[in-house]
Amino acid sequence: MLRTLKKYKAPYLFILPFFILFFVFQLIPTIWTVYISLTDWKGIGSPEFCGFGNYQKMAVDDMFWESLGNTVVYWISGLILIICCALLIACLLNSRYLRKDSARAFFKTATFLPNICAAIAMGLIFRMLFDENVGLVNEVVSLAGGPKVPWLTSTTFSKIPVIILNVWRYTPWFTMILLSGLLNISKDYYEAATVDGANAAQQFWFITLPSLKNILFFCSVTLTVDMWKLFNESYILPGPGTSNSSLFQYMYESGFNVFNMGYASAIGVVLILILMVISVIQFAVRRRQGEL
Amino acid sequence: MNRNKMISSVAVYGLLIFITLICLFPIVWMCLISIKSTSESITGFHSIVVEHPTLANFRRLFEMIPVWQNTFNSVFTTIMGTITSLFFCALAGFAFAKYRFPGRTFLFYFVIATMLVPPEVGSVPLFIIMRKVGLINSLWSLVVPRIATAVGIFYMNQYIADVPDELVEAARIDGCSDFGIFMKVILPVIKPAMASWGAITLIARWNDFFWPLLYLRKQAKYTLMVTISLLPVSEGLSTPWPVILAGTTLVIIPIIVLYLILEKFQKAGIMEGAVKG
């Protein structure tokens, strides 16, 4: 044991920083969260043990269930819309009809820019774009003959701007990842398919999609984590009450606005459990398909 | 056949131009409004026309919030965060890619698995830990926890794995120490990867919002992003839109310019002349 440690001192030392940081800033906080969630603690004084009190409170808390529902909406809509848009844009950028390399480079850069823009700043811009009275979006809607839509002031519509902002900002990142996958598919497959008379749709369905399976899986896993920890977008584009709150945002507000640390930690534990269950399901499905 | 090709070409270009417009419109629109005088109409389509461009909104912004102080905070955390993260991620990526130490595979999958549960869920105890070590209201609270990130290690590992083993072996025979190999052989070779990952980290740190919101609790310590988020409420409900959008312009445009510059570096040749023959 000691001899191995001595022999491989260098690599162990090189990876040590990560594990120290993981221990102090991720593992301990996670375990500690579980402990605090079992106490009644307002941030001052010492925590009082209260068993599953916080969880019982959560079960009948409408705001908790609304935030959970919102997060599921953001997650599913994000997963479908972002991956579809990213796939479309990546295919367009990789298209053989895009002949000039300079044009390709331009479109690549231009379509990546949304990902660079801060969610907070874009949220403020979207707040103005979607303003009920002065917003540009409503102007376009009324030009098309529709009524003024109360985007951010009604519970029916308030999630739409958040979803649009999500799609706008996250799509470029996944476009880039999918594009790198597309570039790795051998051109020979397509040539052979063309000779065999397969049309573009068939080529996409039988060559492109199967080749991208691993990358699409990677995208859906990372996007899932991103969407469950969504905070900035719904924080900066609030609807009435908690109609737009994500679960993670509700946790932050319970802990640091209302100073109900015990309750916030209980929400944290629920988030951890949900993320673990989703990961296990994702990897189990993948394993059944025989890909892992 | 030829006509079909024409139609396809037009469709591809048309769609791409349409998508580009959607991508660029909010950014351009923001810039236009930020230079409008407050007396001009910003309702609907009127918002697109700028009659009297002015910098008054930016002046107003500088009077309202300590822009220089907050910019310094943002720049400091961004640069320190990026440099430390690049160095330690590359170091760990190098260890995973070029050494066959016991437990390597397990530890590597362990690193990957830590990505599945984000550290944000433990923010209550994290706040307590930061208070205990005296890092609340300190800019270091944004740097220290993330000097080695799982995704960074993963990225660097992928890239360093492609560096030929002969390079490492040759340096070792020449009597180079392990750390020396990293500094003198690996780092120079992985410059393109450092540029790409550096750009990604730089953008993420600049746009960081949740952690500064959590750890920095007074205006002199805010990063630019936190200050900007408070603009709509910092003068009651009356902050005019052009001033708010001047603020967002201030955080978005510099990072776009920086990105366009960094993009040039990323195209630098990979593995240029590293192995002869």
Image (cartoon, rainbow, N blue to C red):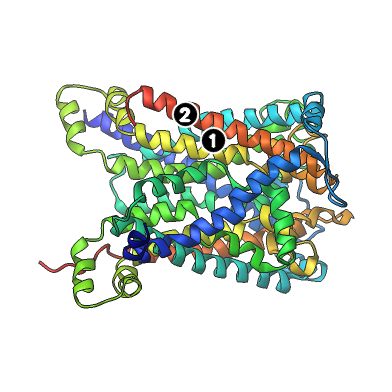
* Residue B193 position in % (x across, y down): 37, 61
Disc nearer the start of the sequence (1/2): 1
Q: Is residue B138 visible?
A: yes
Q: Eyeballing the image, is B257 above or below A183? A: below
Residue that mark 2 sits on: A282
Label ID, residue B23: none
A223 displayed left or right of A217 = right
Q: Residues within 10 Å of mark 2 (few under 14, many from 20)?
A: some
The extreme bottom residue here reads: B175
Q: Residue at x 55, y 65 (%)?
A: B81
Dividing the picture into quadrants, the one containing residue B58 is: bottom right
Kindly state the secondary structure of the residue where label 2 is placed: helix
> Which is nearer the eye, B230 or A257?
A257
Residue that mark 1 sits on: A224
Amino acid bearing label 1: Thr
Q: Residue at x 34, y 34 (%)?
A: A212
* Residue A96 position in % (x across, y down): 27, 40
* Residue A150 position in % (x across, y down): 78, 31
> Which is nearer the eye, B62 or B168?
B168
Label 1: chain letter: A
Q: Residues within 10 Å of mark 1 (few under 14, many from 20)?
A: many
**Rendered-image quadrant of the C terminus of chain B:** bottom left
